[in-house]
Image (cartoon, grey):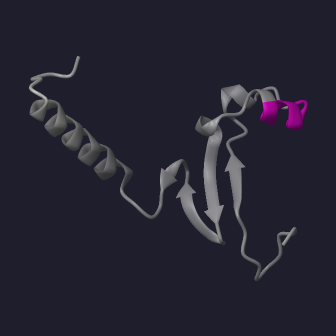
Amino acid sequence: MGSLEIGKRADMILLDNRSPSLVPMVDGYGVLVHSASGHDVDTVVIDGRVVLANGRPTLADGHAIVARAQAVASSLWQRAGRSTVQ
């Protein structure tokens, strides 16, 4: 706990320092507190395992999840007697 070393498990995020919301990077803590958002996250490591790389999930197909969510939402909308999303 408390250090990044070979053989230790880690939880961490890496931000894209080229993201417009993080520029100019003159006060790192200030930018993180006041400007950074989830859109700036490039990589996420949980328990030593990369779960997001280059802004894309590594353990699931993000496009398939979004397509399935849209299909379920459309089905529920139709069951409610609505033909289109408003």
Q: Quadrant of the N terminus?
A: bottom right
Write down the quadrant of residue 20 in the picture: top right
Residue at 32%, 44% (x, y): give it.
66
Figure check: 14 above or below 9 = above
Measured as percent of width and height from the top left, residue 43 is found at: 62, 54
**Residue furthest top in the image:** 86
Residue at 77%, 79% (x, y): give it.
8
Q: Is residue 78 left or right of residue 58?
A: left
Q: Quadrant of the C terminus?
A: top left
Q: How many marks?
A: 0
Measured as percent of width and height from the top left, residue 71 is found at: 19, 42
Q: What is the magenta range?
A: 26-33
Figure check: 1 above or below 29 = below
Q: Is residue 59 left or right of residue 49?
A: left
Measured as percent of width and height from the top left, residue 35 is found at: 74, 27
Q: Is residue 80 left or right of residue 64?
A: left
Viewer-closest of 59 and 23: 59
Q: Is residue 27 left or right of residue 37?
A: right
Residue at 18%, 37% (x, y): give it.
76
Residue at 14%, 22% (x, y): give it.
84
Specify the principal SS of the magenta part: helix
Write down the quadrant of residue 7 in the picture: bottom right
Figure check: 60 above or below 34 = below
Asked whether residue 62 is drawn in magenta, I would say no
Asked whether residue 31 is drawn in magenta, I would say yes
Viewer-closest of 65 and 63: 65
**Residue furthest bottom in the image:** 7
Viewer-closest of 78 and 32: 78
Measured as percent of width and height from the top left, residue 82 is found at: 12, 23
**Residue furthest front in the image:** 80
